[in-house]
Image (cartoon, coloured by chain):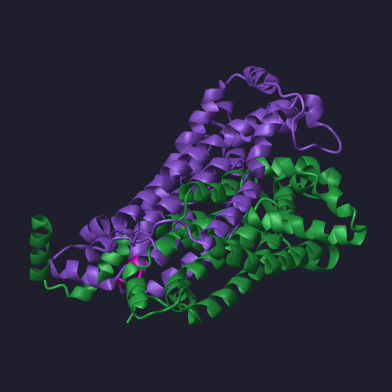
Chain colours: A purple, B green
Amino acid sequence: MSTYGLYYGIKPVRRKGWSFGQIVLFLFLMGLAAFMMLPLVFVVVNALKPLDELLLFPPRFWVQRPTLSNFGDLLLATSATTVPFVRYIFNSVIVSVSVVVLTILIGSMAAYALSNKHKFPGQELFFVLVVSSLMFASEVTSIPRYLIVNKLGWIDHYWALIIPPLAGGYGVFLMKQFIDQVPREIIEAAIIDGASDWTIFWKLIMPGAQSAWATLGITQFVATWNDAFSALIFTRTEVMKTLPLMLQTVGGGSIARAGAGAAATFLMIFPPIIIFVFLQSRVVESMAYSGIKS
Amino acid sequence: MSTEASRAIRVRRLRIPLHTQQAIMGYLFITPWIVGFLLFLAYPLVHSFWLSFNNLENLVNFQLRYIGLQNYVEAFLIDVNFLPMLYTTIRNAIIDVPLIIVFSLFTAIVVNQRLPGQGFFRAIFFLPVVIGSGLVIQQLFNQYQAEMGQAPLVRGIDVPTVILVVGPEFARTVLDLMNRLALVLWRTGVQILLFLAGLQGISSTLYEAARVDGASEWEKFWKITLPMISPIILLVAIYTIVDSFTDIFNPILNYIKNLAFAGQFRMGYAAALGWIYFIVVFALMGLVFWIGQRHTFYAGER
């Protein structure tokens, strides 16, 4: 794990100049990167297309006469509803951030208990539960889930969007696989020094598994941010709807709204990218710090 | 530290043996997750299992009628859509999952090298996830795929016209391959990220030692990287399988969703299909897990 490199005090060996292999690799990556960029370019280009180009058959990739009128259409489409556009963004941000923070916390704690740093009766059974919980698409359990949320009185509350996703086993499983990698000697040394599990968890495990929870944070954010289904079944009023659900409503309505849909799509992809850049820089930072680069 | 120390002393005075202490802490740490699991996964599952033997008679007061195995009989013998969909989904997963694992491991290793623009490449490879896992790409695909029967992006960049010169048969094969490849490529973001995090977890002392011993890059990969990263490979395999069986393109899930919510409200039948689907996925994952656990190396264990 990132910080443990510090204990060994190893610095990366710097070589000067590029080898032939590095240049080939670089060019290969550039090609691949260009290909990977396509969806992003496509979304941006689509947002700039006038209506007739959007509906063109067969579709054309590039835009001929770029225009900003789609964003005007989007404003118009949302001003027709009683709720300002910012409200959807606000809802989405609240829900996504809460889910990310709580998933990391709950997942890491459970993972620490299930990791090979512990032994207690029932541990294996719990792990089996975690793994089997990975398999259920939320659609399959959505009916009873709806009934429970309804019984708890959470319909049309943020709770209904925040709490149910936390039950997934993905976070626990991911964190466990990484915590297993932490060298046992460090934990043992801490135990001999009289550190409690709580201290070990916060002072050793969490800083050590930074890249793991940053990864978990990114994936959870993307999943929650893009999830329209929960909002569809758990919300009633317009003020509680999230951005993807609103996007579905705007884009899916009629052909005339295709432009507004493209513009909304464009606005939708930016927050995940920002989160990604923010968290990924943390990962890279901690890695550069520890000198574990080969 | 002092409060912890004093608590440790207090605990010792109570004469709780160390392993009991560990067990208590273990349970405490896992409790928050277990509560959520019971409420929002275990109970709904049991409930949906029960639901699968019933027929929803009245939506308003959720009145159910017990009909035994009738829903399951319908799934296998009457429903002409379900089994072909199931077959296609499994076949696609079996083809795609190994491709995704190999490609993402390869890319992660390459991106983990010291290269100019390292951060840029990492960001690029994750971009498709940011866009592609959501509604956004679904809409793009829906819009075009219905008309074209193929991915719009490949079509859009005019690759086909170049290949068409060679011959229509060849062109179709290449197109299929490109479509699959494109979809596979755009589904590797999370996996690359997982592998990257795993690669960064490998202590550099191992590589230093190997270098001193005169190991080649090839040997380092097989003797250090691969064993050290094997828990992550298992993680990625499981993640990819789950992802391919639960993503938004999945025809079965859409079918189930529509049965349950879109007008028909055939919740009993939807629950039965959900359970059949779950058992299939469970069997596949169990297989992968069984294979994976025997070949996984855990550094922390002795």
Q: Who is closer to the viewer here, A194 or B69?
A: A194
Work out which quarter of the rendered image holds the N terminus of chain A and state it: bottom left
- Secondary structure mostly taken by the magenta-highlighted segment of the chain: loop
Does residue A115 belong to the magenta stretch? yes
Work out which quarter of the rendered image holds the C terminus of chain A and state it: bottom left
- Which segment did they paint magenta? A113-118
Could you tell me residue B283's position as x and y percent? 62, 74
Q: Residue at x 53, y 38 (%)?
A: A155
Could you tell me residue B79's position as x and y percent? 83, 61
Q: Who is closer to the viewer here, A12 or A166?
A: A12
- A238 sits to left or right of B30: right
- A25 sits to left or right of A212: right
| Above-or-below relation of B122 to B208 | above
Q: Residue at x 55, y 54 (%)?
A: A26
Q: Residue at x 42, y 73 (%)?
A: B228
Q: Residue at x 80, y 46 (%)?
A: B155
Could you tell me residue A115's position as x and y percent? 36, 69
